[in-house]
Amino acid sequence: MLERSTLLVVGLLLLLACGITDPKYIDYTEGTDESTAGGTATGTGGTASGTGTAGTAGTATGTPTTPSYAGTAKAFLDKNCAKSGCHVAGATAPDLSTFASAKAGGPRSQVRIDANTMPPGGGLTAADKATFKAWVDAGYPQ
């Protein structure tokens, strides 16, 4: 049977091969053969996780997705901003009802969301804020 230290090295190499290099996702706990060790890696818009037996690494599953206007930002904006009487054409600027106008208004909107001044009365969860910020940080992909 292989030494525990050898199994740990093999496990770390498997984690590296899966692209998990952040130490906070690596469990260095030395356990018995019955214990489990593994980790979870989270990316924007997706989650990868894995588990395995002590000394071995789990396999990452899932593919983090790049946020897009059509995939994430539009639903967020329609729900929270581009509503009748708010940020739509002919109402309060900036218009956030189309891709082009939302992209143009994105930087200003991000500042207001971060400052909790939009939407009026707040009400955005941390996940809501992260959804919009991920789209802004990705460069406003359509």
Image (spheres, grey):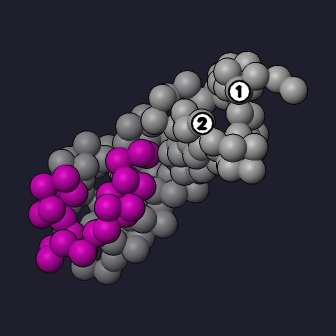
- Give left or right: position of 29 versus 53: left
Give the mark nearer the N terminus: 1 vs 2: 1
Which residue is label 2 attached to?
A: 30
Relative image position of residue 58 (x, y in whole percent): 73, 40
- Give left or right: position of 5 versus 123: right
Q: Which type of secondary structure does the marked residue at label 2 adopt?
A: loop
Relative image position of residue 42 (x, y in whole percent): 53, 45
Q: Amino acid at mark 1?
A: Arg
Q: Is residue 40 above or below residue 139?
A: below
- Note whether residue 5 is visible: yes
Is mark 1 in CB contact (under 8 Å) with mark 2?
yes
Magenta part of the chain: 112-135
- Give left or right: position of 124 versus 118: right
Q: Is residue 3 magenta?
A: no
Q: Amino acid at mark 2?
A: Glu
Q: Is residue 121 magenta?
A: yes
